[in-house]
Image: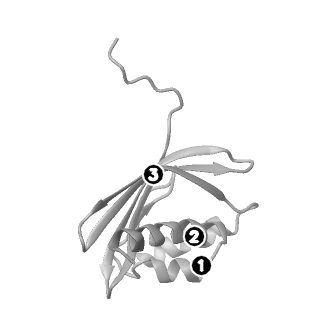
Amino acid sequence: MSEREQLQLANENFYSFFEDTDLQGMSTLWLNSDECWCTHPGWPTIFGWLQIRASFEQIFSGPEPLQFLTSNIRYHGTSDVAWVFLEENLLGSSLAAVAAVNVFKKESGMWRMVGHQASPLIPDLNLGAD
């Protein structure tokens, strides 16, 4: 499996674990370190795996599981650090779209997540010059 395929699989696993409310899977995917950071939409930035884990416990205990449809995915990086830009389209009663970046670090031959940032998208934003 190529480096890019491994990175793609790690990124896909993040969303699978999220949809399955799989805290053990998240614990395996994330680097269990204080260098990790996470900003869920509307939340303050959380630092360190223990706080990030607590945030997922809280999200996973919500009234309905989240389902993601990802799009506009772009992979970048080196052989040791990589980042994935994408749009997360949340399905269900809380329809929303966010722009996200997922950051991975190669540890012991595996891509481990070290950062996640997601912020709401503004629909129909016109960036063209008038």
Give, as a three-letter code, the residue at label 3: Leu
Q: On screen, 87 above or below 57?
A: above
Q: Is residue 8 left or right of residue 92?
A: left
Q: Earlier in the sequence, mark 3 or mark 2?
A: 2
Give, as a three-letter code, the residue at label 1: Leu
Give, as a three-letter code, the residue at label 2: Phe
Q: What element carries label 2?
A: helix
Q: Which residue occupies 66% across, 58% down?
A: 67
Residue 86 has which mark?
3
Q: Depth check: give the residue in front, 77 or 104.
A: 77
The image quarter containing residue 10 is bottom left
Q: Which of marks 1 and 3 is in front?
A: 3
The image quarter containing residue 112 is bottom left
The residue that mark 1 highlights is 23
Q: What element carries label 3?
A: strand
Q: Picture coordinates of residue 14 (x, y %)?
A: 52, 69
Asked if disc 1 and disc 2 are in contact, CB closer than 8 Å, the reply is yes
Q: Picture coordinates of residue 107 (x, y %)?
A: 32, 83
Measure how far apart labels 1 and 2 are at the Cα level: 7 Å
Q: Nearer the viewer, mark 1 or mark 2?
A: 1
Asked if disc 1 and disc 3 are in contact, CB closer than 8 Å, the reply is no
Q: Which residue occupies 62% across, 68% down?
A: 58
Q: Picture coordinates of residue 118 (x, y %)?
A: 46, 52
Q: In this view, does 96 lie to the left or right of 105?
A: right
Measure how far apart labels 3 and 2 are at the Cα level: 20 Å
Q: Picture coordinates of residue 89 (x, y %)?
A: 59, 48
Measure how far apart labels 1 and 3 are at the Cα level: 22 Å
Q: Which of marks 3 and 2 is in front?
A: 3
Residue 56 has which mark?
2
Q: Earlier in the sequence, mark 1 or mark 2?
A: 1
